[in-house]
Amino acid sequence: DTLLLYCTSAPPPKGQKIPGCGGMAVRGSGPRSLRLLCLHGYRQDARSFRARSGALRKALRGRAELLFVDAPHVVAAGPGEASLLEPLEGSARGWWFSSPQEGTFSAFEEASSCKGLEESLKAVAEACAEHGPIDGLLGFSQGAALVGIICALKQRGDPRFQFDFAILIAGFKSRALDHQNYYQEPIQLPSLHVLGETDRVISAEMSQELSSYFREPLFLTHPGGHFIPVSAAQKKTYLEFLDQFGK
């Protein structure tokens, strides 16, 4: 197996403990597997997203290396909100705020202006530069919405983002008015869109709306809710999609 998992600023040497990730760096001698940069959802961080994606990491073992990066913005808990935060260890983070004054985000808010996107684009670009080559981006929820924006920037020729495909799980189109310029032209990049039929956080319709901005989107639809599906049939779909990009 070839599997590289870390969420620090640089990959540790072989056999060294990964700070904050609870794992070891493992490097195989086989051909280079695909390298995916993974962007977590709102109120998650690299560590909690890594923990929640354990089944996917197992399913892709030997086929892909999953690298996890923190969003640059910490989400502060408001009055009575502490119980809503991720129960796993780590900090609650976000890629941008739809309500800059309150420091909060809602996928349904049609905000006139947002805060934090540029810092997040810079963070992802730096991760791509430090840990490249990156073959693809994988995003969940708000992270998938950010992947959609990055795909649009790549389509325009932004040199910071060099990758070949995207996997968007429970993604959505940003409602922010100052983000609408990212949805002006079809995106040519190969993409796999994962939709939960009973997702009550990000509906399947919202994910379908985002997929409509991609020229030839592929779909993985599952009967569940707001999580990463990895049944046997779903694993087959992920692997068949990734097979297009085997080195």
Image: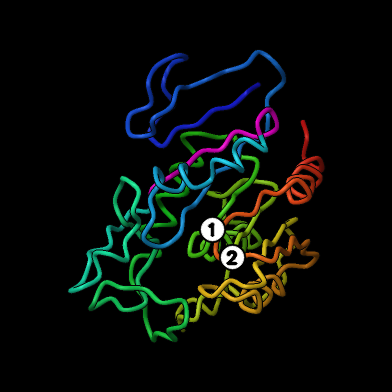
Q: Is residue 30 magenta?
A: no
The magenta segment: 61-70
Q: Quadrant of residue 85?
A: bottom left
Residue nearest the viewer, comparing 88 with 14: 88
Assess whether mark 2 and mark 1 are in contact (beta carbons under 8 angstroms): yes
Q: Residues within 10 Å of mark 2 (few under 14, many from 20)?
A: many
Q: Is residue 33 left or right of residue 21?
A: right
**Quadrant of the frame with the N terminus:** top right
For label 1, the crowd category at 10 Å Cα-Cα, with few meaning under 14, some 14 to 19 and many 20 or more, is many
Residue 12, image x and y in percent? Answer: 41, 22
- Quadrant containing the C terminus is top right
From the viewer's perspective, tell me whether residue 46 is left or right of residue 152. left
Rendered view: 163 above or below 227: above
Real-space Cα separation, disc 1 to disc 2, in angstroms = 6 Å
Which coloring applies here?
A: rainbow
Q: Which residue is mark 1?
A: 140
Depth check, front residue: 223 or 154: 223
What residue is shown with label 2? 170
Q: Position of residue 82 (x, y in %)?
A: 24, 64
* Image coords of residue 194 (percent x, y): 67, 61
Q: Is residue 69 magenta?
A: yes
Disc ID at residue 62: none
Q: Amino acid at mark 1?
A: Phe
**Residue displayed at 72% across by 20% down:** 31
Residue 165, position as x, y percentages in the image: 69, 50
Q: Is residue 82 left or right of residue 87?
A: left
Residue occupying the far left of the picture: 79
